[in-house]
Image: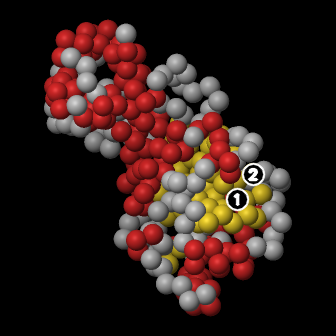
Amino acid sequence: MAAQQNHTAHRLLARYRIRPTKRLGQNFLVNRGVLEKIVRAVAPEAGERLLEIGPGLGTLTRLLAMAGAHVTAIEADRRMVELLEAELGGRPNVRIVYGDILEVDLDALIPTPRWRAVGNIPYNISSPILFLLRDQRQLFSEAILMLQKEVAERLTARVGTKEYGLLTIGLGAVGTCERIFDVAPGSFWPPPKVTSSIVRLRFPELPPYPMLDLAAFTRVVRAAFGKRRKTIRNALVMAAAEGQYGFTPTPRAIDVALSTAGIDPVLRPETVTIAHFAALTGALAT
């Protein structure tokens, strides 16, 4: 079965004279069973609006459209756009958009908020895409994404573990994340060197910390993890002295804020909860 699926992908790419580009992170998911499992995880409703990031060969796009969803697919490779328009352009519920997800005007593309995002995210730009979705979360209710397993583990990490960090805290401050299932390298062509994971990010209309200044929060967390082996107090003081990430409070202000937030200054950043980071951000703002 896998050989047949790979042959289909080869044939389609050969028809349009396309070779996968490593720079664009092109590893096409060809395992039909995994594709159908993703569709079941998405569970699209008839007429629902989905934004697909990086449709590739359009295999998932086709299945989502067959399930009745209206799919707007953003593709950064002009060669793939030609393939997608030829293969799927005749479907009234599929729209192909040429562009970079990190540069496209999402507000113009999504006129009615609370769509869902899906996609096989290029691993070399997964963090910027995750933070883009976070910062544009008013447009999305959730995102079901294929990511490198290591990134998925960081998104879902528990406080106190080595995986817990900026991704865990930055996304956890606005919603929730669950790892649904893993995908072996052999399910792709060409196969990547790593295992992948499907994750579900939920962005509730009322986030866990509704009054949080997210930009200030991100500066605080970046400063804390900039010197990960240091205590949180020393890491923050050093980041402020160097003016990193636009973080510039005085040592005195940091000491007062840590005390106000109830954070022991000798703790390591990876042992500080999201709630405490939110409290610290608020204390630094006063």
Q: State the image coordinates of residue 77 (x, y, percent, origin top left).
A: 54, 72
Q: Is residue 232 above or below residue 254?
A: below
Neighbour class for label 2 at 10 Å: few (<14), some, many (≥20)? Answer: many
Q: Secondary structure at mark 1?
A: strand
Which residue occupies 69% across, 66% down? Answer: 96
Q: Nearer the viewer, residue 254 or 172?
A: 254
Identify the residue under disc 1. Answer: 72
Residue 231 shows in the view: no
- Apparent side of residue 237 relative to residue 70 in the rendered image (left or right): left
Look at the picture and state if 18 lies above or below 70.
below
Structure colour scheme: secondary structure
Residue 284 image position (x, y, % from top left): 33, 16
Percent across and percent down for residue 165 are 33, 39
Image quarter for residue 78? bottom right
Tags 2 and 1 touching, CB below 8 Å: yes
The residue located at (49%, 84%) in the rendering is 19
Q: Quadrant of the C terminus?
A: top left
The mark that comes first in sequence, 2 or 1, is: 2
| Residue at position x 39%, y 61% in the image | 124
Q: Residue at x 34, y 31 (%)?
A: 219
Q: Judge whether 172 appears above or below 131 on screen.
A: above
Under mark 1, the amino acid is: Thr
Of residues 112 and 58, the one nearer the viewer is 112
Q: Secondary structure at mark 2?
A: strand
Q: Quadrant of the N terminus?
A: bottom right
Q: Which mark is residue 49?
A: 2
- The amino acid type found where label 2 is placed reads Arg
